[in-house]
Amino acid sequence: MAGGTDQNLENALVPERINNLHALIDTVPDAMVVIDNKGAIISFSKGAEKMFGYNEAEVVGENVSMLMPSPDREAHDGYIRHYLETGERRVIGIGRVTTARRRDGGTFPINLSVGELIIGDDHLFTGFIRDMSEQRETERQLHILQAELAHVSRITSMGTLANSLAHELNQPLTAVANYVEAAKDLLDQPSAENIAMVREALTECAAEAIRAGKIIYRLREFIMRGDTVREIASMSRLVKEATALALVNGDGRDVDFSSRLDPSCDSVLVVPVQIQQVLVNLIRNALEAMTDSRTKRITITSRPVDGSKVCVSVSDSGPGLEPHIAERLFHPFISTKASGMGLGLSICHTIINAHGGKIGAEPSDMGGTTFNFTLSSAEVDEEDG
Ligand code: ADP
């Protein structure tokens, strides 16, 4: 049968083609990992060897989850099963920013794209992995710059505001001062007519004071308006991106990083970049606290609280808080670091407060510190939906 011969020839060519392809892929600096439908590694490019620190021979046949930190490490078999059973694509053909784990246990940010390959009966998945450490560092610098810019422009507009405020408030305050002076003079001769005039002056005084109050109230409204549009965001996505952002420059190299986020409270109502900033600050603080620690672990967890809130915790295995710092932890300019500004936690406090949440710290069960903060959940109850 002609068809059968073609097929045989085709099959005979497959290994050779794959070899050629391998040689080609080895020239690409990004990593490429091919796995079968059970998650076992079939091919590991030179780029992957360099990125993860394993030789191809060591990893072929092993489960690809060894290249991931928790919780993906435990959940990855389930991801594949879910896709094969439902066809629902969560990463295939979409790509995402996530975190990978090197041979030495260190973690680093990656951009992962997954493709699907069906050869005969074999169902394979190809993962293309780009190390984002450098790109993330650039983005982080950009973020810092943007934040500084926003701060400068806020100060400038504050200056303008302060001028117009002084100008607007000056009028009612001068009026109040004049009325009070006049009333004082009138009271030196307390005739019935003068007392009536004093009453009138005080009524005017009260009206002017209320006017001044309204000016201040308007100003507060103006300042509060700012860039605080909240939207529904995925906590796991915020954590993934913030982690990638915080672990730049190989800072997470020797840190065992994991997250256990409760999927039942994944949707939160937040200003995403602000919550990322909180997470980045807390993760960087944890990294800095563990500089001299032998065990370096960071765990991020989430759980629903009080029905409509989500509590997020960032825990580390560092030395814990210095006692004298604990009670003024969220005040600005409190720092134990030689080059610390002592602003990170006070910014976190302001952001979480503006979200209607609370932030606090306690000893962690890993011997270090746990920072907890709450946010509003955006999960809709089934019956409300
Ligand atoms: P900075 O990092 O510039 O010092 P922060 O406001 O972020 O400012 O932190 C204030 C201080 O809180 C730090 O200097 C440190 O002493 C303490 N701190 C923050 N996070 C941790 C942590 N995870 N473990 C131990 N101490 C911490």
Image (spheres, rainbow, N blue to C red):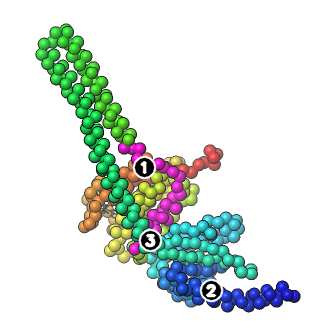
Above or below, 118 against 382 in this view is below
Instruction: Give the amino acid type for the residue marked by disc 3 in the picture.
Output: Gln
Q: Earlier in the sequence, mark 1 or mark 3?
A: 3
Q: Secondary structure at mark 3?
A: helix
Q: Is mark 3 within 8 Å of ligand 1?
A: no
Please give the name of the residue rendered at 74% of the width and 81% of the height, measured from the top-left corner: 120
For mark 3, does the 10 Å Cα neighbourhood hold few (<14), some (14 to 19), or many (20 or more) residues?
A: some
Above or below, 383 against 250 in this view is above
- Circle 1 residue: 227
Residue range in magenta is 223-249
Dominant SS type (magenta): helix
- Circle 2 residue: 21
Check residue 135 in the rendering and tell me which mark sits there, or answer none: 3
Q: Nearer the viewer, residue 302 or 178?
A: 178
Q: Is residue 304 visible?
A: no
Dividing the image into four quarters, tell me where ligand 1 lies: bottom left
Residue 112 image point, x, y percent: 55, 72
Please indicate whether residue 270 sits to the left or right of residue 363 in the image: right
Residue 242 image point, x, y percent: 45, 64
Q: Quadrant of the N terminus?
A: bottom right
